[in-house]
Image (cartoon, grey):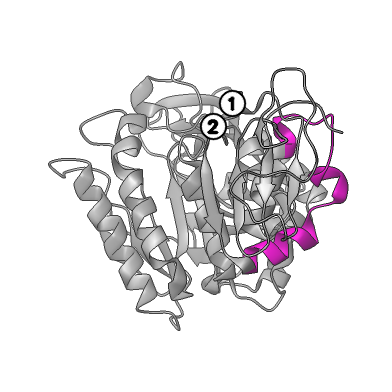
Amino acid sequence: MPPYGDHFIVADSEIIIRVVRGFVGGRWADAGESAPLISATGCDQTRPTVVVSGATDVANDPWWGINRLMTLSRRSLIRSVAAVSATALVTGGGTARAATTLHTAATTGSAVPADWMGALPDALSLLRMTMPGTHDSGCTDPANGTEWSHTQNWGITEQLQRGIRFLDIRANGLQGHPDDSFGIYHAAYYQGITFDEVLAQCSDFLRQHPGETIVMRLKKENGTNNDVGARFKDILNVYLDTKGWRPWFLLADRAPSLGEARGRIVLIAQFDNDWPILQWPTGDNDFLSNQWFSLQDIYQGLSRPSLKTAKVTQQFDNAIGDQESALMYVNFTSYAGGGWPKVNADAIMPGVQSYLNAHLSDRTHLGIVPMDFPDFHSDTLSTLIDWNWH
């Protein structure tokens, strides 16, 4: 018998994941009592039911809250039952980590979000995927600037572990090492992390999760005190060859298949170069496109942040209406005008989630969706990952 604690319930015809108290003999259990493994209020007991117990600190986990209920398709259930080990499902000594494992298995078709791409076929083009990302991925500390430049709470490693697969990396010369190293910046503000550290964290993740890929936009960030100008490309070559990072990168002028990209970083260039690789569209603060991408990145100039939601949903509509396109769709949910990024995200993301909920049955792909603070909006992160099975 597992100890008293919060429980997670998975029913047969749909997944019901709910934090409840132990339920014994038709009544709520008192503190210290045990609860049976197969026990769920409101569930048909003739159907297979699995209860995960022991997650007593679940209320403190950002992925979960008491009495939070979500339902998912039977298709997702089948994948999650196949993916999650028995020890993760039925255990008496787990913590909120076990709960998170169950949640992500149910929503992604994989036991943990760190491995969600592993369940997808090698032949699948990156063009035909829905991929959550982060905007200004290295900007995790308001001390490195202000709250105006603070866009993420998770560092690079945790972003990847949580399922993020697009990184928005903005770099320029590193103070004291301008000839061979990049720092990560938000405008003039150095973010306390080097490009060397970003690559080390990415390669460590890919080494541990070889079925995954990372798509990286590398932008030469203007406005810094250490601007390397046209030498940016040369310094990147130092990383690729002198520092030995080239084997980790997939440098191609087309969107690869997932099989080609597994275990590697797919580079998108936003700096002066003449290389035959994926190139970010030119322009700013608009709907933009080139031969590789269709991009929405309107980040200022709107009278209120909620109008940004309309731009995001417009780009989703564009992607849904262009499913056979040779373009990779990119749709930034981030907005910089009028308030701090975290405030704007709170205004924008509920409308984004509503759109995703309403269109999940369309069986489409949406492209890359970079976000601010996905830890505050984990429902959207999970929904975007789950979109790859619809």
Specify the quadrant that holds the C terminus: bottom right
Image position of 340 with respect to 113: above or below: above
The amino acid on which the numbered mark 2 sits, given as a three-letter code, is: Gly
**Seen in the image, is 341 located left or right of residue 362?**
left
Image position of 179 with respect to 259: above or below: above
Q: Is residue 283 visible?
A: no
Instruction: Quote the CA–CA distance across marks 1 and 2.
Output: 5 Å
**Seen in the image, is 282 located left or right of residue 230?**
left
Foreground pick, 316 / 166: 316
Q: Position of residue 66 (x, y in %)?
A: 55, 31
Tell me if mark 1 has few (under 14), some (14-19) or many (20+) residues whose alpha carbon lies within 10 angstroms of its own.
Answer: some
The residue drawn where x is 35% and y is 38% is: 345
Q: Is residue 329 visible?
A: yes
Check whether the beta carbons of the residues at disc 1 and disc 2 lie within 8 A of each other: yes
**Seen in the image, is 372 located left or right of residue 78?**
left
Main secondary structure of the magenta stretch: helix
Q: Quadrant of residue 202?
A: top right
> Magenta segment, which residues?
75-98
Q: Position of residue 187 (x, y in %)?
A: 37, 32
Q: Position of residue 365 (x, y in %)?
A: 48, 70
Q: Give residue 65's mark.
A: 2
Label 2, secondary structure: give it: loop
The amino acid on which the numbered mark 1 sits, given as a three-letter code, is: Ala
Q: Give residue 59's mark.
A: 1
**Seen in the image, is 149 located left or right of residue 3?**
left
The residue drawn where x is 43% and y is 74% is: 362
The residue drawn where x is 42% and y is 27% is: 150
